[in-house]
Image (cartoon, grey):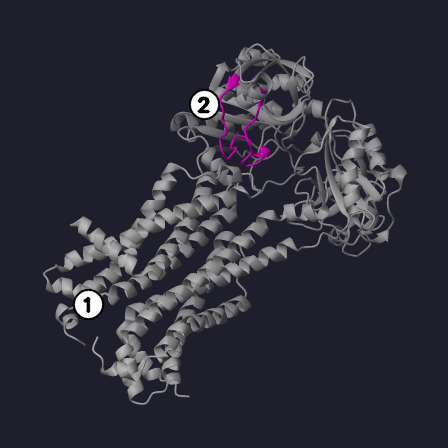
Amino acid sequence: MFGYFLELALRSLKRSKALTALMVLAVAMGIGACMTTLTVLHVVSGDPIPGKSQKLFYPQIEPRDEDNGFYTKGEPPEQLSWRDAMALLKAGRADRQAVMTGGMAPVQQADTTQDPFFVRARYTTADFFALFDVPLKYGHAWSATEDDRRERIAVISSSLNDKLFHGEDSIGRTVRFNGADLRVVGVIETWRPHPHFYDLNAGNYAEGEDVFLPLGTSRDIHAPRSGSRDCWGKGHQVEENTLETADCVWVQLWVELDTPARVADYKAFLVHYSEEQLAAGRFHLPVNVRLRNVMAWLDSQKVVPKDVHLQVWLALGFFVVCLVNTVGLMLAKFMRRSAEVGVRRALGASRGAVFAQLVTEAGMVGLAGGVAGLLFAVLGLWLVRKQPDQYASLAHLDLPMLAATFGMAIGATVVAGLLPAWRACQITPALQLKSQ
Amino acid sequence: MNLQIKPILSALRRHKAGTILIALQIALTLAIVCNALFIVHQRIERSNRTTGMDESNVIAVQNRYVGKPETFIPLMQTDLAAIRNVPGVESAYITNAFPLRRGGWSTGMQIDPNKTKDSLPSALYFVDDQALKTLGVKLIAGRNFTPSEVVNLPPQSTPAPAQVIITKAIADKLFPKGDALGKTIYYAKNKPSTVIGIIEKLTVPWIEFDHMDNVTLMPVRFDSSYQHFLVRTRPGQQDAVFKAIPTALYKVSRMRVLPEKYGLRTFETVRANAYEADRGMAILMTVVCAVLLAITAAGIVGLSSFWVGQRRKQIGVRRALGARRSDILSYFMTENFLIALGGVIVGTGLALGLSQWMLKYFEMPRVSPTYVGVGIVLLLALGQAAVFAPALRASKVSPVEATRSV
């Protein structure tokens, strides 16, 4: 029966080519616009580290005095000072914890004539790789002992490994980073969480880093920082190499807490730590701590650009107009076939059968609209990728989105076909068979 | 002119679904189009904001020194001399930031030496005696820096030189009496800076900032591997200088990187880069509006043609009873006008509602009545234009149709 409906639908769609093309085009454009904008939204507001984002937390405390120097609207500063970060790291109250900051410096293979080039680097502590589930291709991460000894070691990205060592297992080889020779202990697989949640200073959708080295080592070799630094009080007159003791916040701490109870404990620990520092006279402002997980942190930093949301709404509005248009055209089309419906009803087709056949027709328009809409979406995403935004290069159609495209197209047109189909099957056969 | 409104309305009652669909489509299109065009208008206005500079004949160079000298100051001096010697260069200076760079340094400033009150933010531009000329900004009071006033600033320390030049916006905010010249401002605790000059207008390097015109010029050489040169060329020499700068710089030293995309830009490019996202959004909105209007028009054509087809017999009867072609034409034109009118009345409500919603969630200004008005006229005209062809076809139905059975 369904096959027969399909055949009838095809025939009728072929009969009025212009009307059919118009319907398909309208649906396709609406779908294309929606899919493009939703894919971009999906990319920019997605979970950067699925499965773990609920367990990763970003502690913040208020270490400043009255001479604030910078304004945070009732929030504690976005980063920690070296002293506080080290104290919290050494306290080890979380399941895992890592302190970090970022920078850019020239890198080259030691003992070659190759020109150095700039790469992004992350200066961090041993837990970083386990904390963020960074996959390793060769070798391993470093240990807390190596952190403490400030060893001259590095973990590099596979793309840098390709550039410097032609993708070979480079464990034990040496890279020259910012003029210092570092022994490669690990090579990571491609790893680019987006948004770049663990340090938004690098840019919300920044690419991953190419060199990772122990934080202590980075201070020893005077590796340049390219994060932000906010200072207060006497902190204003500090030099870069005395940042460890300065009244400045410039490093980030991430901790892993596996259960709600651990989270509550850790928050209490932060409050307790702040109170201790107040008592000791290091802190001066009322205790103000935050412990946000990944998604809450991204939310508080307003990472998703407003324009992206605006574009999604615009596309949805556009799609609704396209659908209303399709409903109108289908109504015209189905009512024009009153005579045909009358004949079929007189020959014994039930109302349900006529209805089902017309809805099948609507579904076919949807299918064709979905295919064309997919082309529009591919084109739209190609245009997005040509945009200068940091996230633009990430905009690719993925399978769930592809499935959603067809689901949406067919679902929407079938819904759009319901009213016209229902109107058409209300036709009294006798009236249509009579000559007018 | 007999507009036959009564019979039209009674006829429309028999085509409720189609009428409502066309009106709804017009209403939604109006709501989206006038808000979208209003956004386009805002974006274009935003990307045309002035910087206070004379932007023609200016080139911006981004330079990063590679290697590890103890200090970058001598390199900066020789580079600057090399650029100033390029034929066609009128003036040049080295800096950390400039308008539309979209990255820079801001700090709080106060007139209280202990910096205890709320401070007013200002962007900091590190300059020398040639900056005013290169930027093409107007000094409205006081004097320019002298070469001997330019001091070296070690990396990562807070700049608070003895002399500063501020924008009129800062002068007005900190010294409402209009006596800013010669007064003291504190950019760091207990480090006084004297205002020696006031410039009319210069904007901060960011395109979103609470105080767009708060800029302080500081006579400072900032010791850092990352520098920008701003170059003013003689009229007509911009292209020649543009080509000559990299050669001149690499001749001084090859230990540098001029980034691929942003290394060397005319100021026209700087402006285009800064507002790229806004321009993209404006183009997108315009395209969406055009397509929406086209789709709505096509929908009207489709439904009207169907109605005309359905009513051939009635049209024939009217023609046989003496109605002229123009009567038939005006019947369909009026019918569409009434539907569209209903649509725009509902649409105006929707447009204002949508604008209110965007005000709440996207902090956008309320849509201006002008745009709603333009949208109403646009859609009524679009409806008339779309219905014209089917109406014309209706008017050509011959009176003989009345006698035919389908």
Q: Is residue B313 above or below residue B177?
A: below
Q: Chain of mark 2?
A: A
Neighbour class for label 1 at 10 Å: few (<14), some, many (≥20)? Answer: some
* Residue B317 makes an appearance in the image: yes
Residue at the farthest bottom position = B322
Instruction: Please provide percent x and percent y for residue A209.
Output: 56, 26
Calculate the distance from the C-alpha at mark 1 to the C-alpha at mark 2. Answer: 67 Å
How many labels, in total? Answer: 2
The quarter in which the C terminus of chain A is drawn is bottom left
Q: Nearer the viewer, residue A45 or B47?
A: B47
Decide: is A213 above or below B19.
above
Position of residue A282 measured from the top left corner of the image (x, y, whole percent): 63, 27
Q: What residue is disc 1 on?
A: A339
Of labels 1 and 2, earlier in sequence is 2
Q: Is residue B16 left or right of residue B389?
A: left
Q: From which residue to which does the magenta span run?
A: A187-212
